[in-house]
Amino acid sequence: MDSAAINHVASHSRNYNEVFNRLTDLVKGAELTFCDQVVAELERTAEGEPGPLWAATVRDQRVDKGAPYAAQRWVLQNVEDIVDEDDPVDAAPYVVAHAKSLQDQGETEITVVTEDTADKPTRKSIRTVCEELSIPCLSVAEMMRACGHRWP
């Protein structure tokens, strides 16, 4: 899950506390995770908002906290237009590296949850890069429905 998706929960759900409680259960059950760079990005861009507060609360409950350095380096060196030169600490390449790393480890049901779906002049969207790497993506609404929850 990326920071745009986490922020989307807070800004688009009728009861974000209920949704975050459901997401917490998924984190505890090792069915949902996010990389450390997502937490840092949330803290940098939306400090004090519900999304970053939730991520900080559950960060230690995650089974997997991010991609190893080799996977991060592979994405940064081999995926074109993933780094936003206007925002070099953007978590996007690390979200993709995290998913690719889990996929490469044999995890069969890896899906990136993102609201980053439109390419920007400065970088490709996470959805575009995931499509290029054959990593499935869902929006928050699609993920919630797939898990049997109503949205919003």
Image (tube, helix red, strand yellow):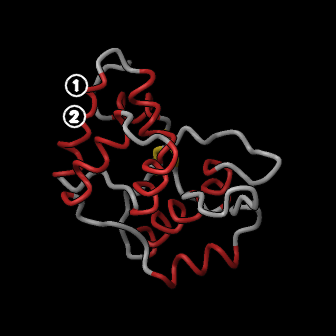
CA–CA distance between discs 1 and 2? 6 Å
Q: Quadrant of residue 119?
A: top right
Q: Quadrant of residue 36?
A: bottom left
Tag shown at residue 138: none
Q: Residue furthest bottom?
A: 70
Q: Identify the residue under disc 2.
A: 22
Q: Where in the figure is residue 100, as x and y percent of width and height?
A: 50, 68
Q: Residues within 10 Å of mark 1 (few under 14, many from 20)?
A: few
Q: Quadrant of residue 9?
A: top left
Task: Say which element carries label 2.
Answer: helix
Q: Where in the figure is residue 105, as x and y percent of width and height?
A: 39, 76
Q: Residues within 10 Å of mark 2 (few under 14, many from 20)?
A: some
Q: Residue furthest right?
A: 121
Q: Foreground: 150 or 94?
A: 94
Specify the amino acid type for callout 1: Glu
Specify the amino acid type for callout 2: Arg
Task: Say which element carries label 1.
Answer: helix
In the image, residue 146 sits, relative to residue 81, either above or below, namely: above
Left or right of 119: which side holds 104?
A: left
Q: Residue at x 22, y 56 (%)?
A: 30
Q: Where in the figure is residue 95, as x and y percent of width and height?
A: 50, 60
In the image, residue 95 sits, relative to residue 118, either above or below, namely: below
Q: Are marks 1 and 2 in contact (CB under 8 Å)?
A: yes
Q: Residue at x 50, y 35 (%)?
A: 139
Q: Identify the residue under disc 1.
A: 18
Q: Residue at x 69, y 79 (%)?
A: 77
Q: Where in the figure is residue 92, as x and y percent of width and height?
A: 58, 57
Q: Residue at x 37, y 43 (%)?
A: 52
Q: Foreground: 55 or 63?
A: 55
